[in-house]
Image (cartoon, rainbow, N blue to C red):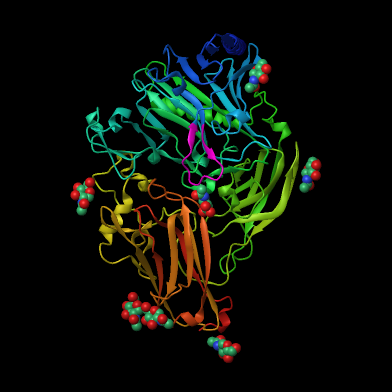
Amino acid sequence: MKMLILTNCFLFFLLMLVLVLGYVSYPGVRLEIQDKHIVMDNGIVQVTLSNPGGSVTGIQYNGIDNLLEVQNMEFDRGYWDVVWSEAGKNGTKGTLDRLEATNFTVIVQNEEQLELSFTRTWLPSLEGKIPPLSIDKRFIMLRGSSGFYTYAIYEHLKGWPAFNLDNTRIAFKLRKDKFHYMVVADNRQRFMPLPDDRVEGRGQVLAYPEAVLLVDPVEPEFKGEVDDKYQYSCESRNNRVHGWICMDLSVGFWQITPSYEFRSAGPLKQYITSHVGPTILSVFHSTHYTGADLVMKFRAAEEWKKVYGPIFIYLNALSNGESPATLWEDANQQTVYEIERWPYAFPASQDFPSSYQRGKVKGRLLVQDRYVTDGCVPAGGAYVGLAATGDAGSWQREYKGYQFWTITDDKGYFTITDIRAGQYNLYSWVNGFIGDYRCDNVINITSGCEVDVGELVYEPPRDGPTLWEIGIPDRTAAEFCIPDPNPKYINRLYVKHPDRYRQYGLWERYAELYPNEDLVYTIGTSDYKKDWFFAQVNRKIDNNTYQETTWRINFKLDGVNTNGTYKLRLALASVHSAELQVRVNDSEANPPLFTSGVIGKENTIARHGIHGLYWLFSIDVQGTLLVQGNNTFFLKQPRNISPFQGILYDYIRLEGPSSLTSNI
Ligand SMILES: *[C@@H]1O[C@H](CO)[C@@H](O)[C@H](O)[C@H]1NC(C)=O
Ligand SMILES: *[C@@H]1O[C@H](CO)[C@@H](O)[C@H](O)[C@H]1NC(C)=O
Ligand SMILES: *[C@@H]1O[C@H](CO)[C@@H](O)[C@H](O)[C@H]1NC(C)=O
Ligand SMILES: *[C@@H]1O[C@H](CO)[C@@H](O)[C@H](O)[C@H]1NC(C)=O
Ligand SMILES: *[C@@H]1O[C@H](CO)[C@@H](O)[C@H](O)[C@H]1NC(C)=O
Ligand SMILES: *[C@@H]1O[C@H](CO)[C@@H](O)[C@H](O)[C@H]1NC(C)=O
Ligand SMILES: CC(=O)N[C@H]1CO[C@H](CO)[C@@H](O)[C@@H]1O
C-alpha cells in the first residue's frame, strides 16, 4: 500500500517535471530586423513581415517554408486593407487600399513576447490618394504559441477630410498547391475547387461575377457545381473560427475571433469567411447583406478611434495516424481557450483595455405580450446587448463603436462582462415576439463598474388579439418554402443540408412554381412551410424581362367591428430595392392602404441569405375596409428591373381591434 502511494507520488512528480520542462523548453521569442523584412520566430512559427509596410510575406511552420501563396507578390499574401471613397460618393464601390505602413517600431521585445507596430499617418499632401486615417497595425507573437495575433488601431482626427469607409479586413492568401479543404463550421466543410477553375474556359460566370459554374474544372469531381464566396458567409455570432486544411502535410491554418465586440452591426450581421483562393478573411466591417446604410461616414470635424481585433492566426499539425478532422476539433478547442482569455492581457496598446478596466452589466429580461403571455414571462434565450446610444434596433446599422452581447438564461437573467468604458443603450430582441427592445436609460460604463439594471420588461408591439399569423417571428425567412435548386446550379455541400437557402439561383424557381398566377395564401388551409415562397421576387419572363408580383392573403372574418381599427404587422427579414404596397379587398386601390416606398439595398437574394436587416411595419386597417366573410390582402412589389429585387418576409399577423367586446 505504502509502496503504491510512493509510486504514485513519484509518477506525479515526474509528470510535473515533464510539464514544467516542456514549458520551459520553448525557446524565447526572437526578432530579426532586416533591411526589407522583419522576422518574428518562437521556434514553432516564423512570421516574416515587410519593413516598413507591415504586410505578412511569409509564414513558416512545421517544415513548410511558406504557407502563404509564394507566387503572389509580397504585398498580396497577408494584409490589412480598406475600401474607401471620398465624402459625398454614394453606393458601396470604393477604392482598395492595402494600408502599407511607412514606419516600423518595436513595442515589446522580450523572451516571452514580441509586439510590433507598423504605422502610417495622413498628411494633407495625400488628400484623395489614401483614406484620411492614421493606421497602427500590430503583430504579437508569444512564447510557445502556435500562431500570432494581430490587431489595428484606426484614427480619424478632427479637421481631416470627410470620407466613407465601406469595408475593412485582414486577408491571407494561402498556397493553392497545398490548401484544398475548407472549414467554416461543423456542417460546412468541403474540398474546394481551384481559383483556376473560375477563369473563362473552365468557369462560366452566372448572374453576377462572384457566382461561377464550373464547366471544366481541373479536378473533374467539381464539374457542374456552382462556386460563390457568398455561399460561405456567416453571422457574426457564429463566425469564431474558420480556415483551411492541407491534407498532404496535415496542417491547418485558422483565424480565430474570440470576441465580435469590434465587428460592425451586432450578432446577426453576416460576413464572408473563407473562399476559393484559397483565401481566409477576417472581415471587421462590410456592407454585405445590409447595403449603403453600412457605409461608414465620417465628417471632417469628427474624432474617431477604433481598435479592430486582436484576432489569432492559429496553426496546427497532425501527429502520425490522426485523422484530418482532429485539426478542426483542435482549432475549436483553441477557440474556446482564446475566448476564455478574452479580453487579452498582453496587447500593449493603451487603446485596448484589459478586463479590469472594463465594466459589467447584469439584469433580467421579461416579456409581456398582451393577449399572448399571462403577465410577464421570462425572456429566455434572448440576445441582450450594449451598443452606441440610439433608437430601438439601431444596433443593426451601428458601426463606429463596440457592441457587447450575451444570451439570457431560461429565466431571463443575463450578465454582460468586459464592456469598454463609454455610454450605451441596452438592446434586445426576443424570438417568438416582434419588434426591438431598448432600455431608455443610458448606461454609463466605467472602469471596474458593475451595473445592475434589475428587471426589464419588453412589451412588443401589440394592439389586439391575433386573428391569424403567417410564419414565426425570428427575423429570418428560414421557415418558409425554400425550393430545391435547379439541378444545373448545385453546390453539393448544401444538398440535404439545413441551410438549403445557400444554393445558387433559387430566385428563379418562383417563375417555375408560379408561371402564370402569383402566390395565393389562404388562412386556415395554406401551410407557410409549403405555400409561402421564401422571397417575393419578380417573375422571370425571359433573360432580361421581369414581371412584378402581387401576393394575396385570403382570410375569413366571422364578423367585423366597423368602428374598430385592425392592425396588420409586417415583419420583413430583408429587402432589396423593393417597395411593399398593401391593399385590402381592392387590388387597384390608389393610393394603396400602405406603401413602404423603395427601401433596402441588402442584396440578400443574390447572396443566398435568409435574412438581411430587420424591418417592422404596423399598418392600421379600418374596420370599414373589411367585410364579414372573405377578405383579401394584396401585397404588391411593383419594382421589376432586376431578379434580385424583392422582399423576404419574417412574419405577418393581423390583430383585431383592441376591445373585443364591441367586435362581432
Ligand atoms: C447621394 O444620395 C443622396 C440621397 O439619395 C442624393 O441626395 C445625392 O444627390 C446623391 N449624391 C450623388 C453624388 O450621387
Ligand atoms: C516615423 O518615425 C520617425 C522616427 O521614429 C519619426 O521621426 C517620424 O515622424 C515617423 N513618421 C511618421 C509618418 O509617423
Ligand atoms: C459617466 O461616468 C463618468 C465617470 O464617472 C462621468 O465623468 C460622467 O459624467 C458620467 N456620465 C453620465 C452621463 O452620467
Ligand atoms: C437566355 O439565356 C440563355 C443562357 O445564356 C440562352 O441559352 C437562351 O437562349 C436565352 N434566351 C433568350 C430568350 O434570349
Ligand atoms: C359604432 O359606433 C356608433 C357610434 O358611436 C354606434 O352607434 C354603433 O353601435 C357602433 N357599432 C359597433 C358595431 O360597435
Ligand atoms: C370564401 O373563401 C373560401 C376559401 O377560399 C371559399 O371556399 C368560399 O367559396 C368563399 N366564399 C365566398 C362567399 O366567396
Ligand atoms: C369592401 C370590399 O372591397 N370588399 C371586398 C373584399 O374582398 C372580397 C374578396 O376579394 C370581395 O368579395 C369584397 O367585395
Residues in magenta, as a range: 82-96
Is residue 87 covered in magenta?
yes
Question: Vertically, is 304 above or below 655?
Answer: above
- The answer to whether any part of residue 543 appears in the image is yes
Instruction: Give the residue at x 41% y 32%.
Output: 183
Relative image position of residue 356 (x, y in whole percent): 73, 32
- To which quarter of the image does residue 106 belong? top right
Q: x and y percent of residue 241 in the render? A: 49, 32
* Residue 551 place in picture, x, y as percent: 37, 66
Q: Is residue 455 left or right of residue 567?
A: right
Task: Based on the picture, tell me whether residue 241 belongs to the magenta stretch.
Answer: no
Q: Is residue 322 above or below residue 664?
A: above
Q: Nearer the viewer, residue 365 or 124?
A: 124
Q: Is residue 26 above or below residue 507?
A: above
- For this view, does 330 lie left or right of residue 529? right
Res. 333 visible in picture: no
